[in-house]
Image (tube, rainbow, N blue to C red):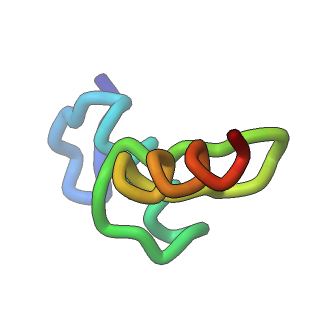
Amino acid sequence: MLPNHEGKRVPRVVFRIRAVGAITGAQTVPQVFINGTRIGGLEDLERWAKKAA
């Protein structure tokens, strides 16, 4: 747990979700990255896997 800007304790995962959202613009988790390239969420990963097969 880490303190937020209001001094309240917040789980680390909240900070990670916000950081990924700020970087990718995505509002859902998980976001999948392969070799440093953002694939997206589950549906995006499924489409990517079909194309890669």
Is 23 in front, or is 53? 53
Q: Residue at x 45, y 42 (%)?
A: 16
Is 53 in front, or is 20? 53
**Image quadrant for the N terminus?**
top left
Q: Residue at x 50, y 48 (%)?
A: 45
Residue 35, picture quadrant: top right
Is 4 in front, or is 12? 12
Compared with 18, 46 (above or below) is above
Q: Residue at x 29, y 49 (%)?
A: 4
Extreme residue in the right direction: 35
Name the spot of residue 18 as percent of width and height, x first. Answer: 39, 57
Residue 8, picture quadrant: top left
Name the spot of residue 20 as percent of width and height, x first. Answer: 51, 56
Residue 8 horizontal side relative to residue 42, left or right: left
Tell me if residue 37 can be seen.
yes
Name the spot of residue 43 as percent of width and height, x first. Answer: 36, 55
Compared with 22, 19 (above or below) is above
**Image quadrant for the C terminus?**
top right
